[in-house]
Image (tube, helix red, strand yellow):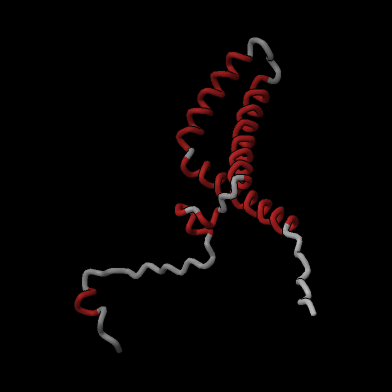
Amino acid sequence: MTVAQAPQVRTDKYDFLVIVKSFLIWTFALTVSWFVVGFPIVAIMATLGALGAVVLQAVIPMSSVLVVAGSLLLINVVGILFGAAFLSVRGIRPDQVSWLRWLDANNNESNQPVYAACPLTCDRTL
């Protein structure tokens, strides 16, 4: 008698779903990080965009602002999507990154407050 072999489970679909989930989470995390941390860079980009629109006004009078704003927005979106795709394909999962602890649902670190009177009152029970 031979032992029946377990049916082989196809992991292709599962791997694809993990990559898609990772890509979506990375897109969200990178977008939030770009809004928070990249604010000075965004201010510099807005200044350079305004100067670029003024320069292009002589060449394209009607749509220079649209061209500059659209290109800046496109560069930011493509950068975020490329970064998320790169991290997802490389197998770097967002819940494994130390600076993204807020994405880990199993993280139960609770910060206990420390007060000045704690040495006198923290050990007491009612």
**Residue farthest front in this picture:** 1
Decide if residue 122 is on the left or right side of residue 91: left
Q: Is residue 114 left or right of residue 111?
A: left
| Residue 18 image point, x, y percent | 66, 56
Residue 57 lies, with reference to residue 78, above or below; the image says above
At 59% across and 40% down in the image, what residue appears? 83
Q: State the residue lying farthest toward the left.
A: 120
Q: Position of residue 81 (x, y in %)?
A: 63, 40
Specify the farthest residue to the bottom: 126
Residue 37 placed where, x, y %?
46, 42
Which residue is pictured at 62% across the width and 15% down the height? Answer: 56
| Quarter containing the C terminus | bottom left
Which residue is depicted at the point 22% across and 69% down? Answer: 116
- Count of marks, rendered view: 0
Q: Is residue 7 above or below residue 80?
A: below
- The vertical placement of 69 against 126, above or below, is above
Question: Quadrant where the N terminus lies?
Answer: bottom right
For the point 63% across and 14% down, the residue is: 57
Q: Please identify the quarter of the rendering in which residue 85 is found.
A: top right
- 116, 19: nearer the viewer: 19
Q: Residue 9 appears in which quarter of the rendering?
A: bottom right
Instruction: Give whichever of 1, 85 is nearer the camera.
Output: 1
